[in-house]
Image: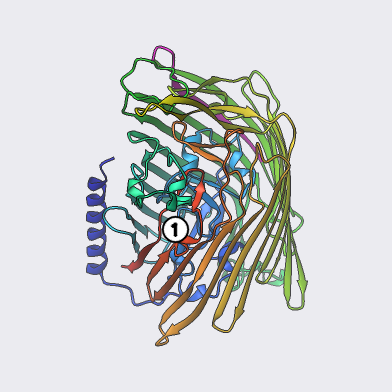
Amino acid sequence: MNHRFFRSVICLLTFLLLFVGNASGQSSRSSSSRSGGNAGRKNTTAVDSSKIVPIGLKTWTVDRRFGSVIPTEPDTMPHLFQQVNNTDGIYGTYNHTGNLASPRITRIYSGQQDFMMGSQFLFANPYSMAMESAEKMVFTNTKSPITNISWMTQGNKTNGDDRIRVNFATNINKNAGIGAKIDYFYGRGYYTHQNTSSIASRIFGSYRGERYQVHGAYILDRTKNAENGGLTDDTYITHPEYFSTKYAPQDMPVRLRSAYNNMKVNTLFLTHRYNLGYYELVDSLGEKLVIPDSLRGDSTILRGPRKFIPVAAFVHTAKFDHNRHVYLDNTTDRSFYIDDFFVGTDSINDPTRYLSLENTFALEMTEGFRRWVKTGMRLFGKHQLLNVTLPDEEHRMVGTTYNYITLGAQLMRELGRLFHYNVLGEIRTTGKKWGEFNVEGNMKFDIPILRDSVSIVVDGFVRNEEPSYYYRHYHSAGAWWDNDLSNIFRTRVNGTLLWRKTRLKVGVETIQNHTFFQEVQDWTNVANPEGSDISQVRYGACVSQASKNVQLLQAALCQDLKFGPVVWENEVTFQRSSDNKVLPVPTLNVWSNLYFHFKIAKVLSTDIGGDVRYFTRYYAPTYTPFLGQYAVQDEDHRVKVGNYPWVNIYANFHLKTCRFFVMYSHVSQYAGPYFLAPHYPTNQRALRLGISWNFFN
């Protein structure tokens, strides 16, 4: 990918948006509206969000099946702004290969990342920082056009990284809004052949009328990731004193120098509904107006305000994906690979194409259109046309087509004051065999206690799924399989307690036929020019299924404390797997953030402090470059990572419509071996800067 070209384009767009924003004049309205939000971690802050959300700006996502609206916080919150550019996530829960927007995998296993009845295009999963799925698309409604421009940078022109993000949203009228987003990442990397480059672009629009509602988006993502295979010897990081010469990161030997993973993701998403219902008279507060019999003939009353009451709805959701993934290695040296299924070729070129067209049709009965209707209901059916193309033995691209039919139903209660629930069941077939199903749901109880309330949430799922297509079939120069795999049977139950600044979650999961990528290593002795033998390692991969059931126990505690200007936020997760050889997880994962929150001159909101990310040592999944996936390590040659604190110190500021920060990341560099993935050290300490500015026309 020509990153200079993309940087030039984005800089030009930024200039144009700035010019338009300044030419139109900035709005003098203060930021004081709250759009509503989730009961998650983002609301447990010391910042009054009602004073920083722009007037009239509302944001939401939509349910991936039925397009129902899910309110969310706008991306204007200053709290933890300094963390948004961390590849390990805001709360430090991801392992990755070290660079900005590099392939990553979460350490907190939830089962959701292995939902086989979702998208089967696995190659996009490790790039979740840059490539957000369609169901995470944020739609907007704003009283005035808004442009947000963000720029974040660290390091220098040799090893640093940059991120430029431009968001634009405006309304056509009070019901219809459109917008666009461009997010560009470029990381040069501290180590040889480690650079990453990604550009994510979105165009979206929505219309929310009383009877008809529609949401649409087009997603175009491109990424190029240079693969170095990790260090040839971890000793360069763990014991640099063993070497007579001090090695800089760019001088440390790596396993690959000419390999790349390229990916293109194209998604078109459309969901719309038509509501059936009636109008009723309401008073000035929007409540149903009860008219006495003596006044029913009064035409003045009958011409009063009316409110539309939806009774039922017809829903249609369509999603089209056209994706491509290619692994390239421009060398004839195949010493890195155990297998070479395309012997004689000058270089490795492993493409796969993925085409999916989904159509979901649903009939919905609306909850609460009568007082006695306490439950909403949906009946739905979905058809998916899936075509996957892989090379055969003759290097010809051969496609395989599947037709999946899914039938299901959903019951939900969302309007109750103390009790809510949502239960969905679906069964899927290829037309030849039945058996795949998914049942998921949640219940929430709100218990009033001493002018406050305690919320108890119970959620979980039971699933019987066929492993994803790429677990069953994959053809490339370095890995080749056509597997006959058993269905995966998965059961999970979570319980969550929410009270003020405390969140306690406990979960347990059982997995039968757990399916995973498995690394394979081959060690041989080869002669070097001096006449002695040295060990050489080559790499391969396969797909494995656990022979026994795997159980996982989890407990997570989030606790925020405030002592005057001092704020201390903590998130601790305990995990225990019954078989760490097939499902490795760290026993303890900790994120802790301590800072001072105050204002300078009564206008500049300031957070000054530091955070630490830590997890106990474990056999973390290793990154396999020729798959572009994380795999369980070879059992005979495993290494542990962890037991190391990543510490950042920062100053985060917010002034009217501008957020900016200064952060010194990884100040704990000399505290031990800083690996998040085996053989992939993280970037070294560096000064980071970032700014995000909202412009209102």
Q: Could you tell me how many numbered marks the image carries?
A: 1
The residue at the point 40 percent across, 43 percent down is: 219
Above or below, 223 against 375 in this view is above
Asked whether residue 55 appears in the rendered view, the answer is no
The residue at the point 48 percent across, 66 percent down is: 80
Number of other residues with Cα within 10 Å of mark 1, as a class: few under 14, some 14 to 19, many 20 or more: many
Q: Amino acid at mark 1?
A: Thr
The residue at the point 53 percent across, 51 percent down is: 94
Main secondary structure along the magenta-highlighted residues:
strand
* Region rendered in magenta: 379-395
**What is the quadrant of residue 578 in the picture?**
top right
Above or below, 87 against 384 in this view is below
Residue of label 1: 140
Left or right of 410? Residue 642 is: left
Can you give x and y, in whole percent of width and height, for residue 277 in the image?
A: 61, 51
The residue at the point 57 percent across, 50 percent down is: 68
Choose between 491 and 232: the one closer to the eye: 232
Choose between 108 and 396: the one closer to the eye: 108
Dot 1: element = strand
Residue furthest bottom as drawn: 601
**What is the quadrant of residue 296 in the picture?**
bottom right
If the image is split into quadrants, where does the C terminus sit?
Answer: bottom left
Can you give x and y, in whole percent of width and height, for residue 575 in the image?
A: 69, 51
Can you give x and y, in whole percent of width and height, for residue 79 in the image?
A: 49, 69
If the image is split into quadrants, where does the N terminus sit?
Answer: top left
